Image (cartoon, rainbow, N blue to C red):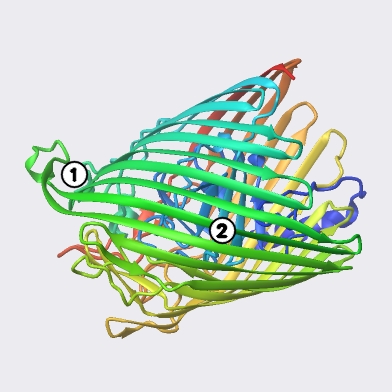
Amino acid sequence: MRIPTFLFLFFCYWGWAQDPARELPEIVITATRLSDSTASAPLSVIVVEPRDLARTGYADISPAVNAVPGVLMQSGSLNTSRISVRGIGARTPFGTNRIRAFYGPIPLTSGDGETTIEDLDIESLGQIEFVRGPRANVYGAGLGGAILISPAIPGNAVRSEVSTTHGSYGLQKGTYAVSARNIGISYHHLSSDGWRQNSGYRREGTTITTQLAAGKNGRILALGNFTSVKAFIPSSLNAQTFDNDPRSAAPTWLAAKGFEQYRSWMAGAAYQRDSGKIRPALSVFVSGKNAYEPRPFDILDQQSIAWGARGEIQSKLGDNKHDWRVRIGAEYFGDRLDQVNFENLYAQNNGNGSLQGSEIASSVQARSMINGFAQATATFGSWNLQAGFNVNASRFVNVSDNARINFSPVWSPEAALSRKISPGMVYVSVGKGFSMPSVQESLDAARNFNKILVPETGINYEAGTKLNLFGRRLRIETAFFWMDVRNLLVARRIADDQYVGINAGRTSHRGLEFFTQYEPHPAGHIQFSAFVSGSAGRFEFSEFVDQKVDYSGNRLTGVPSSKFAAGLNVNHLSGLYAAADVLYVDRVPANDANTVYADSYRTFHARLGWSKSIFEGLTFDFAAGMSNLGNEKYAAMVQVNALAAPGQQPRYFYPGMPAQIYTHLRIVYLISK
């Protein structure tokens, strides 16, 4: 914690000493089109730009995500991760939920709230917006907020691009992209032997993007993506093995040679009018996934398909003195999940890994959701008032026996009041959010719907500042929040792959977040920029009794009390550049009883490169970097409330990757403008 504090004070002191000649650019956001930049939006939103994604290589997105205050991405491997925002989603057994995510017009979140962003190729992304807390009512009012990922939009120029990355543990990545006349096609492949047993990874994907003019003031965005993945699973380790042999895989996963293999695809199109008093927008999408996952306890075969549409209208009212805007719309989402579980006879397969046996169970579940939303803003001089609501109606149907749950409509209002001040703005806000139960949480022990289950809900109170100082060269954002979550959804594990959901109490989420970015006037031929971000808070069970054990007052499982990140960029006019980053994560409680913790850790990353235009139209960029410079031994992900097999210790810890090096080469050829 001392390192980020020192850097923060140093950057502030430097800002006073520099000549005010350079400004940080405004970053346009889409989280609320009623506000067009991070500086003027009365909510907690941080934008990760392409240059941020490149700081620690192009294979793993988690370092860029963990630089966002209040957001933690635990990454057990390239295919196993969990994102939590202000403690929301931290107790999810596997994966990410309670946070809605979109890739352009296409939802990345399934009907029961599961989200996957790590399959997207980093080099094909534009920017990523992290809206923290339940203020994104136009995107579903999720308790954790929303993640809005913009694809890289091709321009009118004709250009081609190739890049290649090589690194430790057999890391290889290649990306090939061409674009012309507003149409772009990119292909990537990523492979790694893995540093642990049974941790090989292979992924390839293709993305097609186009943006075309539609009439005088409109545009159409169309997007398609196909991804194929095969990833072996080393799983988590108990404390003794984690300390003494972190490279090993869990014994049963190693014997079964467990893996997940899937093919996923998505396609969507969106129309939007960008000017005029009335601005309609419409989008449609469809996506699908076929997955096969042999685990030691069974083999899971899944097929899913999702579809949906979204429409909205913006209207600008008022006059030059009073700016009034209204946004109203609705969204429909539907999906269907077919699932079959088979025996895994790996113990009878002479050491050759998994072998499919007889069918154990099967289920077909269909889910549908309708969101209605409205948002209005009114500006009176230096004051701005924003208010809105989201109403959600969801239904789960068990297709095999036509059993269903029709959840009562959930209303989620929000309001924010902000005032412009000479160096920026201050704001206060209140917003309600909710989370639906997942597929597993919605079932009881007999795999029937638990009809007394209700969504968990929370109200978030927030006050913040957004300042631009010293000629807009220093940006400082702070946010104080307090959220109370009721009807806490708890996934109680009753078997290797079976959970039951219960509403079991309340949690309290209180904290402070800050982000500061500094970019001074160039000193001769050198330009540098720096950032410091952090969050600290108290996350606890305010009321929680499970199986007659009272956990009230305990720290919330899977959530560190504090997290800090800092980074420095240095660029020389010759084309040489360097970057360095540090991340600190406080210790993390691994179980509800708070008897087991993952230790705190610090990781350092560094990158040195050279970018040069060899001749007109041809740009060459070469970089070499190292991740985890100090070879820190740490748990990159925690398996919350892990159960122990008879005679064994519970496996709480996913070991973090040791020190690794990589090189990256990128060549861009601009054929014509």
Q: Which residue is mark 2?
A: 330
Q: Position of residue 519 (x, y in %)?
A: 80, 47
Q: Is residue 256 left or right of residue 639?
A: left
Amino acid at dot 1: Ala
Q: Is residue 556 above or below residue 563?
A: below
Q: Position of residue 415 (x, y in %)?
A: 68, 72
**In the rendered image, which quarter is residue 86 located in?**
bottom right
Q: Residue at x 27, y 68 (%)?
A: 449
Q: Position of residue 365 (x, y in %)?
A: 29, 56
| Quadrant of image for the C terminus | top right
The reply to whether residue 184 is in sight is: yes
What's the CA distance linking mark 1 and mark 2?
Answer: 46 Å
Q: Is residue 384 left or right of residue 243?
A: right
**In the rendered image, which quarter is residue 406 located in?**
bottom left
Q: Residue at x 45, y 43 (%)?
A: 286
Q: Residue at x 60, y 25 (%)?
A: 666
**In the rendered image, which quarter is residue 395 located in?**
bottom left
Neighbours of disc 1 within 10 Å: few (<14), some (14-19), many (20+):
many
Q: Is residue 19 above or below residue 179?
A: below
Mark 1 or mark 2: whose residue is earlier in sequence: 1
Q: Secondary structure at mark 2?
A: strand
Q: Secondary structure at mark 1?
A: helix
| Quadrant of image for the N terminus | bottom right
Give the total of numbered labels: 2
Residue 382 vs residue 88, the one in the foreground? 382
Q: Which residue is mark 1?
A: 256
Residue 572 vs residue 668, the one in the foreground? 668
Residue 671 vs residue 578, the one in the foreground? 671
Q: Is residue 554 above or below residue 615?
A: below
